[in-house]
Amino acid sequence: MKRLVAVATLLGLGGPAAAQSITVSGARLSVQAGTTVSVSDSLLNRTGSQLSNSGTLHLGRTLNNAGSFTSDGLLRFSGTAKQRLVSGGATVAQLEVDNTASAGQNQLVVTDDLAITQRLLLTNGLVRTPGTKIISLLNGATLEGEAAGRYVVGNVRITRSAVAGPVDFGHGAWLDASGQNLGDVTITRTAGLRAAGVSYGTNLGATTKGIDRIWTITAAQAPTAAVPLRLSWPAADDNGLTDFAQAQAWRQGTPAAAWELVGARSNANSRSISTSTAAFGRFTVSNAANPLPVELISFTAERRGPDAWLRWATASEKNSSYFVVESSPDARTFRAVGQVSSRGTTTRRTEYQFTDANLGRYAATTVYYRLRQVDADGAESYSPVQAVSVPLEAALAVQAWPNPFRNEAVTMLISTPHTGPATIELADAVGRVLWRQPTNLGKGSNTISLPRTAQLPEGVYLVRVQQAAELRVLKLVCQ
């Protein structure tokens, strides 16, 4: 065996040849049709060089392309250790992987995007891509030989043109356009990466998960009716899930959206589930013990008159106990203003609502809301924050000074957007009214002195100011 360095302007191999390694440097290496070239170690095609293969090119370890590379023949990786293909974004006709190394080493790592025009054949071993790179099988190209222990880990994309009927894409996805003209349909499968949100779906708290496969389906023409869909996977991608007697398919419109139920639960102990969908997107599967949400499909907060009206919906829930509604006038310090019981465990969409009365009591132009979702085991998660604008005319504000006070008069500043009658009361800590005075407040700021505060004994007192439907209560402390 030898090391072959191609340095001439043109080197054509027209008969069987073998080398330990080949470096193409400033030259062109051509493997002609009907010719087999075997490289037991590595082939390096340097920048400015050309490598073309119309025959069969066997690699025992690595192909590293930094130049021009075309292959309308067979590119075969048949090593006994981990192998590597640095394609430089090339397109090849046929790629075969026949790696007989031990488990964990029996793989071909494809480091770049790679397009295949005819066939990807898996005889032995795995093919692995990084999470951001894709092996694309163009229209007419087939994926053959996938089975337990030999499949693509990472991203494999398959495109079929003029889809109007049933099509088996060959990477665990089958669909039937049922007479609809979907045009070009592309399904990208991401599998085996053990990456949440990339190769498997989770709920918001990442406490439940689906299988380690996500299929992303796009079509030139959106479906106008339900499309039957079948998804399949090997045991290696169960992702720790053990019982698929009641499996559930899920759809996600975008990677940032919530997972939504697709169809009903069904038995998928054979690791294949059939459903139908009227919209494409990202699809995955979980079992009954791992519904992907408690997730908010929506959470809105809006002003209705003097109140805030909050609405939210979940796609499904698992062991959810209740929601705490929290508010804040400054988006920093939140306090609970209400609690709503949840459904516990359900795979159905559930809608909730809550009214926070009298926004004016916050004396703020914006009030912020969030949900704290509490599970039966005490685990908590928070929703995004929503804001409600409070017009100035909705706010009645009361201040008093000094506070605390002692043997002195107390002055109140009452701000109101309305001119009109009001009532001011002073009560002790048990609610007994010590003093009540009707008054007429003018629009804007009103300064009022509370009588006899200099004679009050130590304790806690409450000042109540009511104008129309708005009530403000202020605590005073005499010490």
Image: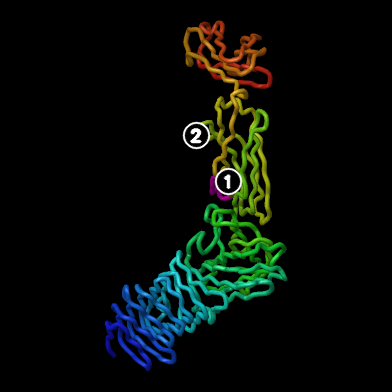
State the residue at coordinates (57%, 64%).
216
Of residue 432 and residue 388, the one placed in the foreground of this image is 388
Q: Secondary structure at mark 2?
A: loop
Say whether residue 380 is magenta. Answer: yes
- The answer to whether residue 100 is visible is no
Residue 317 on the magenta segment: no
Q: Report the span colored magenta.
A: 376-382
Q: Give the vertical position of 360 relative to 175 (above or below).
A: above
Tag 1: amino acid: Gln
Residue depicted at 63% across the width and 36% down the height? 302
Point out the residue furthest to the front here. 9
Residue at the location (48% across, 82% down)? 94
Q: Could you tell me which secondary element the residue under label 1 belongs to? A: strand
Q: Would you call the spot at circle 1 few (<14 residues within 10 Å), some (14-19), or many (20 or more)? A: many
In this orientation, does residue 376 appear?
Answer: yes
Q: Is residue 38 left or right of residue 150?
A: left
Question: Mark 1 or mark 2: which comes first in sequence?
Answer: 2
Q: Quadrant of the N terminus?
A: bottom left
Q: Residues within 10 Å of mark 2 (few under 14, many from 20)?
A: few
Which residue in the protein does label 1 denote? 373
Residue at image mark 2? 333
Q: Give the CA separation, mark 1 to mark 2.
A: 18 Å
Relative to 249, residue 2 above or below: below
Residue 247 in percent (x, y) is at: 64, 66
Q: Position of residue 43 (x, y in %)?
A: 33, 80
Please give left or right for residue 324 compared with residue 402 in the image: right
Dividing the picture into quadrants, the one containing residue 16 is bottom left
- Residue type at tag 2: Thr
Of residues 446 and 350, which is closer to you in this image? 446
Between 81 and 90, the one nearer to me in the picture: 90
| Residue 348 x %, y % | 68, 55
Picture layout, residue 304 above or below residue 253: above
